[in-house]
């Protein structure tokens, strides 16, 4: 009777068209099988309390919940604050829990009107695959796989399927060859299963190779619902043993046999790979053919039979005994031809009397080393050029010294040139008057600005002359040879005399020449009347020539 009243109540609420606001704690839930999970619908801004709460399962069952209500022998229980929340707790998640769960919340507002709201939750219960198996050429779960890699089938791929059956939530697939993982991307297809679960199939394009013979091709599945016990039992693994049949593997290298003695018996061995065991073969030496396991007609060459090398699958060797090695046997290249069910191959070899020479240096390594050295040298040169240009590292002090030397030379040259230019102008007249009167006479027609410019020019000329004579005095004192200095002055006078004669001879110009007074230069005590304000430099007196 109570259940009927509840259903009538919910029906009236739905028909009323009045809704309240409900919030879910989670809109999607993903759990592993046998795990526990909770779902809660919370009523927002209620003035009263929740009057009715119900959850509908993916199979359509309705569980009406009140405080401490339980279903399915306690697997499903009421959860949370029943006054404000419509919550459900599910223990031991099962396959049937997968799908959409819907909650219905009903409450009464202040006007005693019923208000209702529904919300849905998507639940995914991860179920691990019930079985992992391989499929090759319509053969399911083969223990071993035989593939004939004949010469006409070389390079062909084989499709290998790894099937994870009856699972919920897509697993991850990884392939191994022996203990080495394969960097292969396998395409995964999904198909619905009758049980409501899905079958996931990953397809690998496998290319057989002779070196894969005897190894295992393994598919390993990763799924969040796998338990530690299932992994320990290797329920997530499927594998197959590979048996590859291939023809004798060719070699591009000529086998060289050393330390052979001419005129004596010598034995050589040839090694090769083939599966299955070679069925026939022959040697060819100097156009003489010797069958495997037999001798030539002269009994000079005798061949042994095929023998497994070191007991390794697919590894074989055969030996040839030469009764008396001749010089002709050490000339040219010989061959060994091997054949099995899958094909044949020819192996070249040569015979030598001397000892085996040391291995040649690796030309590639030598080339790489040279290139590295060249690069290092270029980098060093570039760094030196940049450092010198920017005055960096050890070039910082050198650059500063060069700049100081250049500035000193420029200054000395500039002072000397200024002094020489000044001596050819109206300096004689300035010395005679004692107060730079000549410059004032030359500018008497000019304005006040020209007069100031003249003073600056006079001061500049005097300063240049002072610098010039100071440099001369330092040069003379450093040499410490007065006679040589006086001889130089005498030569200067002689030169001046020659210039005067040239002028008296008819070559006249407007240039006025000055004689240097030796006494003024040597004594250094006579002061010039030419002075500059606040200047402490002493000047030599210049006598004008008449």
Image (cartoon, helix red, strand yellow):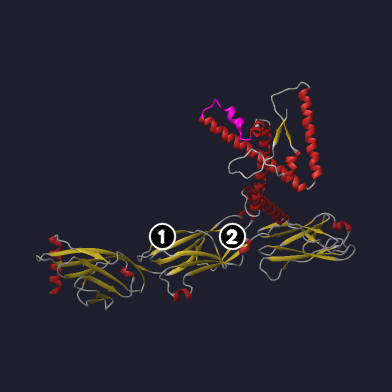
- Mark 2–mark 1 Cα distance, whole angstroms, equals 27 Å
Image quadrant occupied by the C terminus = top right
Of callouts 2 and 1, which one flags the residue occurring earlier in the amino acid sequence? 1
Residue 539 drawn above or below residue 4: above
Q: Residue furthest left?
A: 111
Residue under the point 81% across and 42% down: 484
Residue 389: image x %, image y %? 63, 47
The kind of secondary structure element at disc 2 is loop
Residue 242 disc label: none
Residue 487 drawn above or below residue 173: above
| Disc 2 packing (10 Å; few <14; some 14–19; many ≥20) | many
Q: Is residue 509 magenta?
A: no
- Left or right, 28 with respect to 336, comes to left
Question: What span is colored magenta in the figure?
Answer: 434-447
| Disc 1 packing (10 Å; few <14; some 14–19; many ≥20) | some
- Can residue 410 be seen by looking at this rendering? no
The residue that disc 2 covers is: 208
The kind of secondary structure element at disc 1 is strand
- Left or right, 37 with respect to 470, comes to left
In the foreground, 44 or 265: 44
The residue that disc 1 covers is: 190
Image quadrant occupied by the N terminus = bottom left
- Left or right, 376 with respect to 229, comes to right
Residue 459: image x %, image y %? 60, 37
In the foreground, 210 or 82: 82
């Amino acid at each position: 009777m109570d259940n009927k009243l509840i259903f009538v109540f919910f029906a009236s609420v739905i028909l009323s068209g009045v809704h309240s606001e409900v919030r879910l704690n989670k809109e999607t839930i993903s759990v592993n099988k046998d795990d526990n999970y909770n779902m809660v619908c919370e009523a927002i801004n209620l003035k009263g309390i929740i009057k009715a709460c119900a959850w509908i399962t993916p199979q359509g069952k309705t569980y009406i919940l009140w405080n401490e209500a339980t279903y399915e022998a306690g697997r499903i229980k009421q959860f949370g604050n029943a006054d404000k929340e419509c919550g459900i707790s599910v223990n031991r998640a099962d396959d049937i829990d997968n799908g959409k769960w819907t909650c219905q919340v009903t409450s009464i507002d202040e006007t005693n009107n019923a208000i209702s709201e529904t919300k849905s939750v998507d639940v995914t219960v991860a179920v691990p695959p019930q079985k992992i198996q391989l499929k090759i050429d319509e053969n399911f779960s083969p223990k071993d796989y035989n593939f004939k890699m004949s010469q006409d089938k070389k390079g062909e791929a084989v499709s290998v399927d790894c099937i994870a059956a009856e699972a919920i939530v897509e697993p991850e697939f990884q392939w191994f060859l022996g203990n080495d993982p394969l960097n292969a991307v396998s395409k995964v297809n999904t198909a619905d299963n009758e049980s409501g679960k899905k079958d996931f199939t990953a397809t690998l394009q496998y290319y057989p190779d002779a070196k894969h013979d005897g190894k295992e091709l393994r598919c390993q599945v990763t799924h969040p619902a796998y338990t530690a016990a299932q992994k320990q039992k290797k329920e997530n693994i499927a594998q197959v043993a590979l048996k590859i049949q291939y023809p004798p593997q060719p070699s591009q290298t000529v086998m060289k046999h050393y330390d052979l003695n001419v005129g004596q018996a010598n034995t050589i061995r040839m090694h090769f790979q083939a599966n299955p065991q070679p069925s026939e073969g022959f040697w060819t030496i100097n156009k003489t053919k010797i069958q495997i396991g037999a001798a030539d007609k002269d009994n000079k060459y005798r061949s042994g039979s095929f023998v497994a090398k070191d007991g390794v699958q697919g590894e074989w060797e055969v030996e040839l005994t030469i009764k008396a090695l001749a010089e002709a046997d050490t000339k040219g290249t010989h061959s060994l031809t091997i054949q099995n069910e899958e094909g044949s191959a020819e192996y070249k070899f040569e015979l030598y009397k001397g000892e085996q020479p040391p291995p040649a240096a690796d030309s590639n390594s030598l080339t790489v080393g040279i290139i590295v050295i060249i690069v290092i040298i270029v980098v060093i040169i570039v760094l030196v050029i940049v450092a010198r240009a920017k005055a960096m590292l050890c070039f910082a002090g050198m650059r500063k010294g060069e700049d100081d030397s250049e500035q000193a030379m420029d200054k000395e040259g500039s002072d000397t040139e200024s002094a020489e230019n000044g001596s050819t102008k109206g300096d004689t007249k300035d010395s005679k008057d004692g107060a730079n009167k000549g410059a004032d006479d030359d500018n008497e027609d000019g304005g006040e600005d020209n007069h100031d410019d003249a003073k600056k020019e006079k001061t500049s000329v005097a300063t240049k002359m002072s610098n010039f004579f100071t440099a001369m005095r330092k040069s003379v004192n450093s040499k410490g040879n007065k006679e040589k200095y006086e001889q130089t002055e005498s030569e200067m006078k002689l030169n001046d005399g020659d210039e005067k004669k040239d002028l008296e001879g008819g070559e006249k110009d407007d240039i006025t020449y000055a004689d240097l007074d030796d006494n003024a230069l040597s004594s250094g005590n006579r002061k010039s009347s030419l002075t500059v304000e606040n200047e402490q430099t002493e000047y030599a007196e210049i006598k004008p020539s008449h």
